[in-house]
Image: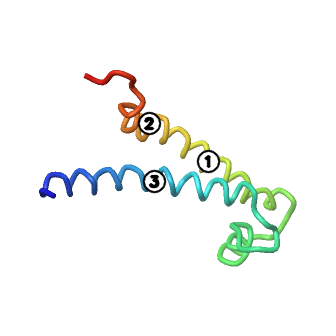
Amino acid sequence: MSIGEIISIALLCIKLAPAFLLLVLGLRYLFYNPDGWNLDRMYEKYFHGRRKKKYRRFTQNIGFVLLIIGLIYTWFVVWPIFEEFFIENPK
């Protein structure tokens, strides 16, 4: 394995990591357990926020935003990388 191949694999991993991270965190926060670790508890603890009704959906809103950003990133950055594998007759 040459240095060029190792560098290309490392660059591929760097491009794929944000997609996985955003999609996993987005799904985790979108379908969170109110009794478990979530962003609402962090908001209350570190920013001394009161747990009003409008802040209870904070975690779900952040999860939705992360999921949308992850899908957009996957569509524009990750999909072109793997698109060549789905071409029927590559040249």
Mark 1 element type: helix
Camera-near label (2 vs 1) is: 2
Q: Say above or below: 71 vs 56.
A: above
Labels 2 and 1: the sequence-earlier one: 1
Residue found 57% across the figure and 51% down from its top: 23
| Alpha carbon distance from label 2 to label 1 | 16 Å
Which quadrant is home to the N terminus?
bottom left
Q: What residue does disc 1 label?
A: 67
Name the residue at the right extreme. 53
Residue found 68% across the figure and 48% down from its top: 64
The image quarter containing residue 81 is top left
Labels 1 and 3: the sequence-earlier one: 3
| Alpha carbon distance from label 2 to label 3 | 13 Å
Q: Position of residue 66 (x, y in %)?
A: 59, 50
Residue found 74% across the figure and 67% down from its top: 40
- Neighbour class for label 2 at 10 Å: few (<14), some, many (≥20)? few
Give 15 or 57, whichever is nearer the viewer.
15
Task: Inspect the image, locate mark 1, and give the three-letter code of the amino acid beneath it.
Answer: Leu
Camera-near label (2 vs 3) is: 2
Q: Position of residue 78 (x, y in %)?
A: 42, 41
Q: Which mark, residue 18?
A: 3
Q: What residue does disc 2 label?
A: 79
Residue found 19% across the figure and 52% down from its top: 5
Labels 2 and 3: the sequence-earlier one: 3
Left-right relation of 11 to 45: left
Q: Position of residue 32 (x, y in %)?
A: 75, 62
